[in-house]
């Protein structure tokens, strides 16, 4: 903090006290006129104070006064006049006076070119800020901004300002990795630096990591008037659909600067989500009063709407942003992304290309355009109500299952919810998880398996992950359920309820699909780490420990189960309709369930304790301590009697004490019979039974795994093999049928299932499996087509059989068995059928 | 007349016949060329690899013995630990034993015989040169080139399934030699999976793509290559081995060779598993019966037409193509059926 003359002592003290105190004192000076009087006297000391004064006024939204102070600093050639000048440019920018702002910023190019080597760190920082704004018109200047910040850092490594600005620029461009490095540098030097803490919160939130709220709280503790932090708090609260808390946070920012547009955008969004259209209009009017060309205001609204799953509204706001400010590349990018999310791929691409031309450093937009370039490798598979976008090589195989699964799920969900999404539902399956992630967020790294934008679903393809990582059938069903719950509630369904219903529907679709109770969930519940239903959104949007998001899905499904138990399944549908009609959650609980969220919390707590009483007794409570991102906190959930029995069982098994291992695994199983995931007691017991040659016992242990675990491929194959060995072909076929939703890419398994269906006389399914073998492009194509032809022939489709056998013979013209079938088909062709003589 | 037709009917056999000493008066065909098999399993370095190399070597030997009817005396297996099966393993897979085994084959082999050399194990690269890791000194491609030199009158297939094996192609490439390497570069140094799939092709009945009852080296290579890719893909892993084949003597490998391309032509005519060819009576049919000769002539004409039609497929209307193909295939099926009846095959 620079200062001089009579007030230097005061400002020296202020520098120690911090930014907050400076702002407050400066405002006092300004308000009392004490600052102005010396200015008129052209007192040097006063001139040197004008930039600090201007900044303080600017933070309070008093832009006219701030501009006067900055102007005085510039005219008086204060030592920090370059900082004052860049701030003048920023004031023009905030008012929408783009041309004037750019004139100010453009001056810095000359400054740098003429005096670059003599500029101080602060002056270089001003150059960097100017370049960042100039980058809006000439994106190559974003690089110059980084260069200037780097030089400022080199000039004075103790100056944190350029590092913070650099981190913010990275974050603006969604370059989280570089942002994190810079943030860490700043916090290593000053762990309480508010802007660095805010940047950290943004970075953590962007990456979906725990700890964002903690960083934000620390930022606000350091500077309670930090408007940007309040705005970010409002955004986090809006993500959690806590409109009141979001409104409070926005208002705290507005108490500092009543016309601060980002805060007004949050306030407007909260009001809109709360169906308060006049309140929304008021906030909009206030924002536009400062800057009638504020595209960013609408871009922010669009972003919030998208985060709350209102993708069409998001696109509409983004379009308003573009109309207000055609050079708002953020708004245009959001427009493009949300057009894609609503299925308008060509229009979305066009907008993204324009946004990219304006700002080629936005990683989100670049990634998405790169992804769109890969769409040529995909093909569309059409079915009633659906269009599937599948990678070309996988389309023939997946279409065999997708069509049936889609028809079944659509009919089931349409019957339950009394609603049909507009045709067609677009389903995109990505072979690369990174591509799916980019489709969803514009960035890689998403932990989810699928996403629903309403009528547009995107998910990992069965080949996008390792076998056993997920069940693509249940994932599809889950996402499609969102299409129904979002659509039937006009996208007003809260996140927790939509997710809960989707898991609930998974479980109804197939035995074993959907999340099941786990020891770590009960440990978290027992330890009070699981939020009550009334705060369940927090579990999705700002997890307190690494597994909390997973737990939130399960908890949400339990909430739906409890409602269905006590009020009937139709109550779930009535709740959706109430949300659609604009009711808040308390209103929905009151009108549909006759209770309050708080009373429901109590009922839910009782329900979980009653339902899992015995299992709660065998797990140790999870206690969250210290850093919420500490993975070991959740790892402690592995304590308790159940975990102890499992550990001892494994140790006994490794030591060759099989009888003891069997006893311990039986104990573990009795303590927690629902737990069949991974290497469960059931799995170990099945292996021990096989070692004893006791197939019956092995089958008995494997059945619960297959019945309650939708990803353990090995258990499915083993059970099918054992059942077949016991001549239970129908049972074995059922198990392999389920296995196809875990890993559909193994030709041998399709051949096995085809043979089973042939044995059972289920020829249509045998045909499907033979088609699957063909789709997997076997080296022995001729055999694959011949077997398909045989199955088609047996199913009564002789025309299909003829075509298939022709394909077999096309590959191997002298293939004797295929020749015999061809001749047989010709001999049995009905008279008059179109045949080659 | 039948002999005059042979080049047209059995074009695939021309090379073998030209090098075979004489024709069998009983069948009118050249006596089958003898096949010699050398299987080398290198040093494992870890129990699981030693076991895997041993398993692949023994499965391959068994497939040669049973499915391909290669006599025991023509199969040589060398492994890291011959004591595991002294009856079937000839010795330790040291450099000197490998060289001796090749020398023995060179001494026994007649002109026109087929020599298969299957190398299983780890490979490495030193100064850009491929090495097969053996107990004791490793063997380089140049070492193999020297050892194989006496086999100039035989058709030789060398299949190096080891990592970093790519250099075997430029060094061993020659006329009448098919060289397969599991990797396309000496930089591909991770343990490979090619051997297992290559042996699977011979041990199982999964790679005979043209259903002629025989398994060519080209079919085996194609199967193994595709299954390797599929395995990596299924495991969602980046593929770290890219097999190549060279058999036109130019020292340059091809990833996707074909029977009608420069690389692949010889491999399509090298059969380790020919025993089952007898099942395809038509493919090997010979007779002095003029009716059969006429049918064979007709079949030959149909084969040519089918081949020509398939080449035109991309430029044809799909329905027209299907109709034309069906007509030819029905004719071919009927012709083959009649030939089988006349020559005693199962109709």
Image (spheres, rainbow, N blue to C red):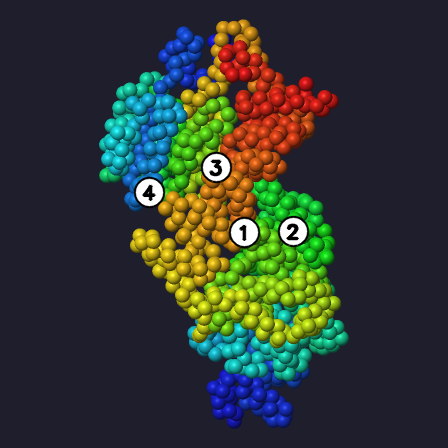
Structural distance between the alpha carbons of marks 3 and 2: 35 Å
Question: Is the C terminus of chain B in the top left, top right, bottom left or bottom right quadrant?
Answer: top right
- Whether residue A718 is situated above or below residue B16 in the rendered picture: below
State how far apart marks 4 and 3 are (Cα): 22 Å
Callout in the foreground (4, 3): 4
Quarter-wise, where is residue A88 in the image? Answer: bottom right
The count of marks equals 4
Crowd rating for badge 2 (residues with CA inside 10 Å; few <14, some 14–19, many 20+): some
Instruction: Pinpoint residue B30: horizontal percent, then vertical percent.
Output: 41, 13
Q: Under tag 4, what secondary structure?
A: helix
Identify the residue under disc 4: B49
Q: Name the residue under label 3.
A: B226
- The residue lying at 45 percent from left, 24 percent from top is B214
* Labels 4 and 1 share a subunit: no
Tell me if label 1 and label 3 are in contact, CB under 8 Å.
no
Residue A219 position within the rendered picture, expressed as x and y whole percent measured from the top left: 52, 78
Residue displayed at 48% across by 52% down: A705
Which one is in front, B2 or A383? A383
For label 2, the residue is A409
Tag 1 and tag 2, C-beta contact below 8 Å: no
Q: Callout 3: 10 Å neighbours few (<14), some, many (20+)? A: some
Mark-to-mark CA distance, 4 and 1:
33 Å
Q: In this view, does B254 lie above or below A78?
A: above
Residue A297, can we see it?
Answer: no
Q: What element carries label 3?
A: helix
- Rounded to the nearest angstrom, the CA distance separating label 2 from label 4 is 47 Å
- Asked if the residue under mark 4 is in contact with the one under mark 2, i.e. CB atoms within 8 Å, the reply is no
Q: Name the residue under label 1.
A: A471
Name the one closer to the observer, A419 or B44.
Answer: A419
Q: Which of A687 and A353 is in front in this view?
A: A687
- Chain letter behind tag 1: A
* Of marks 2 and 4, the one in the foreground: 2
């Amino acid at each position: 903090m620079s200062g001089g003359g009579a007030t230097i002592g005061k400002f020296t003290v202020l520098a120690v006290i911090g930014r907050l105190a400076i702002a407050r004192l400066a405002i006092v000076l300004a308000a009392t006129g004490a600052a102005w009087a010396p200015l008129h006297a052209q007192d040097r000391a006063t001139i040197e104070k004008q930039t600090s004064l201007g900044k303080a006024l600017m933070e309070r939204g008093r832009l006219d006064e701030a501009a006067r102070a900055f102007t005085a600093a510039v005219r008086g050639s204060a030592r920090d006049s370059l900082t004052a000048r860049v701030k003048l440019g920023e004031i023009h920018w905030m008012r929408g006076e783009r041309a004037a702002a750019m004139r100010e910023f453009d001056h810095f190019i000359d400054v740098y070119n003429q005096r670059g080597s003599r500029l101080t760190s602060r002056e270089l920082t001003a150059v960097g800020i100017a370049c960042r704004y100039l980058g809006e018109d000439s994106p190559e200047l974003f690089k110059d901004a980084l260069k200037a910040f780097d030089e400022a850092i080199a000039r004075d490594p103790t100056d944190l300002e350029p590092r913070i600005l650099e981190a913010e620029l990275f974050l603006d461009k969604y370059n989280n990795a570089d942002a994190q490095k810079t943030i860490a540098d700043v916090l290593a030097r000053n762990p309480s630096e508010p802007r660095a803490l805010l940047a950290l919160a943004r970075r953590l939130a962007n990456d979906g990591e725990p700890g964002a709220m903690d960083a934000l709280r620390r930022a606000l503790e350091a500077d309670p008037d930090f408007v940007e932090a309040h705005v970010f708090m409002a955004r986090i609260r809006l993500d959690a659909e806590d409109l009141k808390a979001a409104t409070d946070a926005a208002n705290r920012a507005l108490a500092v600067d009543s016309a601060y547009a980002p805060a007004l955008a949050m306030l407007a969004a909260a009001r809109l989500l709360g169906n308060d259209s006049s309140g929304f209009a008021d906030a909009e009017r206030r924002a536009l009063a400062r800057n009638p060309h504020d595209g960013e205001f609408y871009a922010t609204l669009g972003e919030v709407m998208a985060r709350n799953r209102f993708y069409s509204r998001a696109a509409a706001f983004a379009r308003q942003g573009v109309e207000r400010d055609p050079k708002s590349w953020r708004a245009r990018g959001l427009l493009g992304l949300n057009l894609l999310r609503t299925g308008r791929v060509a229009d979305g691409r066009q907008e993204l290309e324009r946004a990219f031309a304006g700002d080629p450093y936005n990683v989100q937009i670049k990634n998405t355009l790169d992804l769109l370039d890969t769409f040529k490798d995909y093909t569309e598979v059409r079915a009633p109500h659906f269009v599937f976008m599948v990678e070309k090589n996988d389309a023939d195989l997946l279409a065999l299952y997708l069509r049936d699964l889609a028809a079944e799920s659509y009919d089931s969900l349409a019957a339950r919810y009394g609603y049909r999404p507009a045709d067609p539902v677009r389903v995109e399956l990505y072979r690369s998880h990174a591509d799916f992630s980019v489709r969803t967020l514009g960035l890689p790294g998403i932990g989810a398996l699928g996403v629903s934008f309403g009528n547009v679903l995107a998910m990992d393809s069965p080949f996008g992950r390792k076998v056993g990582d997920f069940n693509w059938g249940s994932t599809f069903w889950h996402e499609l359920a969102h299409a129904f719950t979002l659509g039937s509630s006009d996208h007003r369904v809260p996140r927790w309820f939509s997710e809960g219903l989707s898991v609930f529907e998974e479980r109804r679709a197939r035995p074993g699909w959907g999340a099941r109770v786990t020891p770590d969930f009960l440990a978290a519940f027992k330890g009070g780490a699981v939020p009550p239903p009334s705060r369940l959104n927090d579990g999705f949007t700002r997890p307190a420990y690494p597994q909390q998001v997973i737990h939130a899905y399960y908890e949400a499904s339990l909430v739906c189960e409890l409602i269905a138990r006590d009020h009937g399944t139709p109550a779930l549908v009535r709740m959706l309709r109430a949300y659609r009609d604009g009711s808040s959650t308390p209103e929905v609980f009151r009108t549909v369930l006759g209770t309050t969220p708080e009373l429901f919390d109590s009922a839910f707590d009782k329900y979980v304790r009653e339902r899992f009483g015995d299992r709660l007794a065998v797990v140790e409570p999870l206690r969250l301590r210290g850093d919420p991102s500490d993975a070991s906190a959740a790892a402690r959930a592995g304590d308790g009697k159940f975990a102890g029995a499992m550990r001892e069982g494994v140790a006994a098994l490794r030591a060759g004490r099989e009888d003891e291992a069997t006893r311990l695994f039986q104990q573990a199983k009795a303590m927690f019979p629902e737990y069949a995931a991974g290497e469960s007691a059931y799995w170990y017991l099945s292996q021990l039974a096989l070692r004893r040659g006791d197939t019956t016992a092995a089958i008995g242990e494997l059945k619960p795994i297959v019945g309650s675990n939708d990803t353990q491929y090995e258990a499915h194959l083993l059970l099918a093999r054992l059942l077949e060995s016991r001549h239970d072909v129908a049972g074995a076929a059922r198990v392999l049928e389920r296995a196809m939703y875990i890993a559909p890419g193994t030709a041998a398994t399709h051949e096995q299932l085809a043979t089973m269906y042939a044995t059972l006389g289920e020829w249509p399914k045998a045909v499907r499996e033979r088609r699957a073998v063909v789709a997997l492009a076997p080296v022995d194509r001729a055999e694959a087509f011949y077997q398909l032809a045989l199955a088609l022939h047996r199913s009564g489709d002789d025309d299909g059989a003829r075509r298939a056998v022709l394909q077999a013979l096309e590959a191997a013209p002298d293939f004797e068995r295929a020749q015999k079938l061809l001749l047989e088909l010709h001999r049995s062709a009905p008279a008059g059928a179109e045949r080659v003589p | 007349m039948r002999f005059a037709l042979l080049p047209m009917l059995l074009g695939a056999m021309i090379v073998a016949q030209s090098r075979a000493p004489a024709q069998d008066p009983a069948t009118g065909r050249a006596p089958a060329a003898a096949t010699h098999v050398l299987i080398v399993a290198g040093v494992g370095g870890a129990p699981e690899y030693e076991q895997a190399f041993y398993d692949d070597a023994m499965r391959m030997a068994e497939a040669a013995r049973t499915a391909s009817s290669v006599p025991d005396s023509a199969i040589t297996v060398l492994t890291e630990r011959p004591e595991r099966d002294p009856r079937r393993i000839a010795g330790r897979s040291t450099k000197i034993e490998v060289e001796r085994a090749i020398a023995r084959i060179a001494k026994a082999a007649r002109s026109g015989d087929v020599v298969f050399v299957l190398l299983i194990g780890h490979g490495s690269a030193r100064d850009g040169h491929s090495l097969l890791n053996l107990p004791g000194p490793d063997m380089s491609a140049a070492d193999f080139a020297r050892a194989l030199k006496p086999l100039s009158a035989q058709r030789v297939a060398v299949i190096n399934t080891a990592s970093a094996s790519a250099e075997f192609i430029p060094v061993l490439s020659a006329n009448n030699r098919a060289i397969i390497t599991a990797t396309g570069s000496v930089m591909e140094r991770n343990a490979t999976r090619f051997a297992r799939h290559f042996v699977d092709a011979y041990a199982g009945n999964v790679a005979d793509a043209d259903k002629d009852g025989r398994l060519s080296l080209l079919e085996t290579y194609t199967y193994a290559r595709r299954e390797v890719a599929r395995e990596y893909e299924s495991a969602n892993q980046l593929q770290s081995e890219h097999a190549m084949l060279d058999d036109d003597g130019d020292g340059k490998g091809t990833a996707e060779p074909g029977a009608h391309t420069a690389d692949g032509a010889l491999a399509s005519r090298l059969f380790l598993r020919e025993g089952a060819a007898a099942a395809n009576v038509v493919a090997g049919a010979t007779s002095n019966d003029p009716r059969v000769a006429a049918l064979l002539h007709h079949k030959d004409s149909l084969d040519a037409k089918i081949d020509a039609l398939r080449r035109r497929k991309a430029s044809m209307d799909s329905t027209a193509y299907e109709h034309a193909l069906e007509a030819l295939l029905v004719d071919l099926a009927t012709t083959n059926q009649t030939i089988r009846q006349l020559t005693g095959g199962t109709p």
